[in-house]
Amino acid sequence: MLPTHCKRCGEVLFDEYVSTEEGFMQMKKCVMCGARYFDKSEIQTIKKKCIHCGKEFIVYSPISAKKVCEECRRKRSLSKKIEKICMCCGNHYIGDPRSKYCKRCVSRLTTQRNAERRGKYAVSL
């Protein structure tokens, strides 16, 4: 039995039909917070193939949009971070390829920019 009101915010739930690989599945959805409720007896383990390595991995939700297995996801997140040299202080740091400054210099530069902006717009009497 599906609930009639949302457990998070207390709003009335509306019917929603989601297409799955086996057919359609009835759900209840809250318009305010986006929470979804569905019958747990309809959940089945679905095997999908990873788009990077081709291995099969298990998805427990029929509406899951996962296309990559956990191993490939971990590898991709680690490979994005590389060792770099800060353009401001010259220290070595690990960051994504687009960054130029370490975390310490980024915070210092943003506070300087904000102070300049405040001084620029300040009205003197």
Image (cartoon, rainbow, N blue to C red):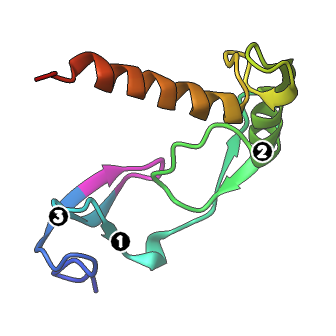
- The mark nearer the N terminus, 2 or 3, is 3
Separation (CA) of disc 2 from disc 3: 32 Å
Q: Distance between the residues labelled 3 and 1?
A: 10 Å
Q: What's the amino acid at mark 1?
A: Phe
- Residue 6 in view, yes or no: yes
The residue pinned by badge 1 equals: 38
In the image shown, does 122 or 37 lie closer to the viewer?
Answer: 122
Per the image, label 2 sits on a secondary structure element best described as strand
The residue at which mark 3 appears reads as 15
Type of residue at label 3? Asp
Give 111 or 32, whichever is nearer the viewer.
111
Q: Can you see residue 81?
A: no
Q: What stretch is highlighted in magenta?
A: 17-24
What SS does tag 1 mark?
Answer: strand
Depth check: 33 or 113 in front?
A: 113
- Residue at 45 percent of width and 71 percent of height: 42
Amino acid residing under circle 2: Glu
Instruction: Kindly identify which numbered label has been placed on residue 56.
Output: 2
- Crowd tier of the residue under label 3, counting other residues whose Cα lies within 10 Å: few below 14, some 14–19, many 20 or above: few
> Residue 19 colored magenta?
yes
Image height of 77 relative to 19, above or below: above
